[in-house]
Image: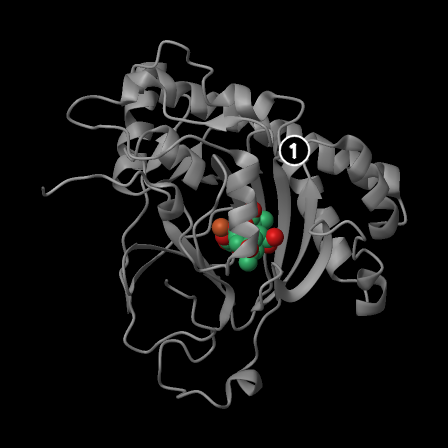
Amino acid sequence: MVLASPNPIRSEKILPIELPIVDLSLEKPVVAKLIVKACEEFGFFKVINHGVPQDIIASMEEAGFGFFSKPMAQKREAIAANNPFGYGCKNIGFNGDVGEVEYLLFNASNPLSISQMSKDISNDPSKFSSTVRAYTEAVRELACEILELMAEELGVPDTSVFSKLIRNLDSDSVLRLNHYPPITIRDCKDRDRSSSYNHSKVGFGEHSDPQILTILRSNDVPGLQISLQDGVWIPVTPDPFTFCVNVGDVLEVMTNGRFSSVRHRAMTNSSKPRMSMAYFGAPPLHACIVAPPDVVTPQRPSLYRPFTWAEYKKATYSLRLGETRIGLFRKCREIDQ
Ligand SMILES: C=C1C[C@]23C[C@@]1(O)CC[C@H]2[C@@]12CC[C@H](O)[C@@](C)(C(=O)O1)[C@H]2[C@@H]3C(=O)O
Ligand SMILES: O=C(O)CCC(=O)C(=O)O
Ligand SMILES: [Fe+2]
């Protein structure tokens, strides 16, 4: 069991490696190859020329910052009765995880719940909810395009095998706005000021994303880091004009381990607020998660037992943020006998 530490550990290494950048305007087969290579090697990549209109992104960002700049008492009105959706501050999940973050979580496939929540979030609820819906639809389309290219390059004849799960009206996808307020030097007085971490705290602790695919956009403030190797962190250079895409646990299972759901975290910045907007494309609760036969071969036998997203989600929410849950669904192999 690996638990996220509340504070950065001094022995950690920060490696300046750039993530692959995929230009979605290139020819489809070229793009598909680049995406699959990035998912195998990094589990993360950036996309440019993604087709999501800049005004939709800008409106979502403005709406998010507008909400987070409100007084705490007003923000607390958006704490939903139907957890886990609504506003949260510092507490992440239900099992004691905390971080220097406040957030809004929406049920991305339920326009009614978005409208209901918007009443507690904004004084112009219909504008707020149409902004969330427009953004969600645009990033869902981007996720589907990427998932279809992946299936094509993996040689899966039904190229909608992954995308149909998140296009389904019952999909359990979520949208999360994370706001990391700047941490001042005073907040860090307990730290060694010569350390490279002296102005930085863990905003959102180390974890993997449970769903199929995450489409993340942040403002121009650094903070996201990925871990390809224990204790080695790769900072992701922020770019408000690109989306950062990462493989979730379900896609790792559905590619029979060919793609990696890589652990990542978000750190706070010393002077500027950071805001990320993450769309987590998920299957419907009843969907059976199993790798298509085309990615299971004698050389690469099936690694996971079939399970439903409901089972996986239940396991996820019963565990701490930093715990690995995918292993619970691995087949027991009688090898070495
Ligand atoms: C501690 C937790 C928060 C989380 C549910 C969990 O029990 C473990 C996974 C966490 C995570 C990480 C990715 C997404 O931000 C999220 C919404 C998700 O689906 O899984 C969060 C969950 C959450 O904050 O509710
Ligand atoms: O804020 C970020 O950049 C990362 C957030 C994240 O990993 C998450 O919400 O799951
Ligand atoms: Fe994440």
| In the rendered image, the vertical position of residue 216 relative to residue 202, given as above or below | above
**At numbered mark 1, what does the secondary structure look like: helix, strand or loop?**
helix
Q: Nearer the viewer, residue 252 or 306?
A: 306
Q: Quadrant of residue 335?
A: top left
In what quadrant of the picture does the N terminus appear?
A: bottom left
The answer to whether residue 204 is visible is yes
Q: Nearer the viewer, residue 91 or 194?
A: 91
Q: Which residue is mark 1?
A: 136
Q: Quadrant of residue 66?
A: bottom right
- Residue at 49% across, 73% down: 201
Drawn side of residue 307 relative to residue 333, left or right = right
- Residue at 27% across, 36% down: 40
Residue type at numbered disc 1 = Thr
Percent across and percent down for residue 3 are: 41, 66
Drawn side of residue 40 relative to residue 28, left or right = left
- Residue at 27% across, 76% down: 11
The answer to whether residue 218 is visible is no
Q: Nearer the viewer, residue 155 or 10?
A: 155
Extreme residue in the left direction:
337
Percent across and percent down for residue 161 are: 45, 18
Drawn side of residue 272 relative to residue 69, left or right = left
- Residue at 32% across, 78% down: 10
Percent across and percent down for residue 193 are: 41, 87
